[in-house]
Amino acid sequence: MVVKALLGTAKDLWQRRLLPAQLRAKDTRLGFAEILGDESLRGAMLPAGPVLALMDLLAGVISLRTAKGVVATVSFDRVELLKPVFHGDFVRVEGQVIAIGSSSMAIQVDGFRYDTPNGAFERTHSALVTMVAIDRFMRPRKGLPELVDEPPERCRQMRETARQRAELTRRWREEQGAVDRLPIVSKDMLLQRLQSKDAFVAVSDTQIEMRNWLLPRHMNQNNTMFGGDLLSWMDQTALQCAKAFAKNDRMVTIDMNRVAFKLPIHSMDVVTLKARVTNVRHVRLEVEVEVFVESVYDASSRMSHVGYFTVLNTDAASQPKPIETGLLIDETNQADMRTLLKAQKRWQFEKENQDLSVLQPLGISIPGASRL
């Protein structure tokens, strides 16, 4: 054990020696490409899961090359679906580090599909991913290089944006926590009371639950579950919850926000996903997905991940369709009332969050991409 510990310490020190003092942002650029979906379903809309998995894989490789060592996903701060992707599409994802802290890295990832009739790539997804360098004890490993760019103003701008996003996250958590400290939540606090719907359902009655077991293909180099695979599971669960609520199979995820990776998921863990509708607008709704892990050796259950998915209700022509069901406001059910108020505050944060998430598109890094 002593020899193993000494070797581990030596490895950590050697990894630090490999790190440069500075790193140019453009030198972190990387792109992956593959054909997604099922060929037999060509032309049908592809769920967000496969694209999310590819984006997470790219962010992982970029951060691995940047940190010269083991990394882990901390969060997907925001993912936007700009245009749909279809089964059989040639999809390319491009990524680049845009900010580096002492142990963390913010990575911008953009997704594209190749539009064959027009002979060009079109941008379909935009994401901001936070990764962290870790040591053999799964603790943050400090000492990452300073990020530089040309012109220098861009790096200063990105550092300021990162600072503003950190402050926004702090305020977001404070406001969410403040709801729990309220003695009571009244219906006057909720804007949803003004909505006109045909029927109303309690938040607690919208919950669905899925449970799964990990396979070797789900494991990464840390012997923990790939973040992209989990994101795909979360998206599937959110979609099923939304479809059951709206009684419509034609629904699509258009936004994923603040997916936090709190605990790693190991090979001997049973994974339970719980989803519930927390906010209903005119044609879209929000689904909260919580992930719990339970080791086969221990019956205790722990929350490992949480995220919020915005799902659009569409008709047969893929056009937005009004949602006829709303969420019940019942002051005697304070658990549901607090859930509704938290969701309302998240929605109110949305505009400010969008403003700080507007990033210059990365574009395609390979020459002649438009002439494939």
Image (spheres, grey):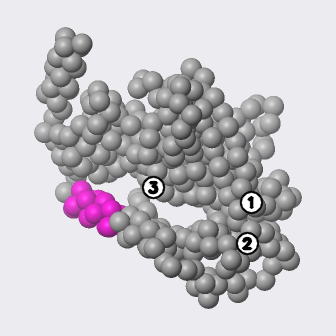
Q: Amino acid at mark 3?
A: Asp
**Picture quarter containing residue 145?**
top left
Disc 3 or 2, which lies upstream in sequence? 3
Residue drawn at x 21%, y 18% is 5
Q: Nearer the viewer, residue 286 or 369?
A: 286
Q: Which segment is the magenta one?
A: 153-168
**How many residues crowd around disc 2 within 10 Å: few (fewer than 14), some, or many (20 or more)?**
many
Q: Is residue 357 left or right of residue 269?
A: left
Residue drawn at x 63%, y 44% is 273
**Picture quarter containing residue 170?**
bottom left
**How many residues crowd around disc 3 within 10 Å: few (fewer than 14), some, or many (20 or more)?**
many
The percent coordinates of residue 177 (x first, y second) are 44, 68
- Name the residue tied to disc 3: 77
Q: Kindly state the secondary structure of the residue where label 2 is placed.
A: strand
Residue drawn at x 25%, y 59% is 159
Disc 2 or 1, which lies upstream in sequence? 1
Disc 1 or 3, which lies upstream in sequence? 3
Marks 2 & 1, CB-CB < 8 Å contact? yes
Q: Amino acid at mark 2?
A: Leu
When the figure is inspected, residue 61 is found, relative to residue 85, above or below; the finding is above
Residue drawn at x 19%, y 11% is 3
Marks 3 & 2, CB-CB < 8 Å contact? no
Q: Which mark is residue 327?
A: 2
Number of callouts: 3
Q: Which mark is residue 206?
A: 1
The percent coordinates of residue 191 (x first, y second) are 63, 83
**Magenta-span inclusion, residue 95:** no
Q: Kindly state the secondary structure of the residue where label 3 is placed.
A: strand
Q: Amino acid at mark 1?
A: Thr
Q: Quadrant of the N terminus?
A: top left
Q: Kindly state the secondary structure of the residue where label 1 is placed.
A: helix
**Magenta-span inclusion, residue 154:** yes
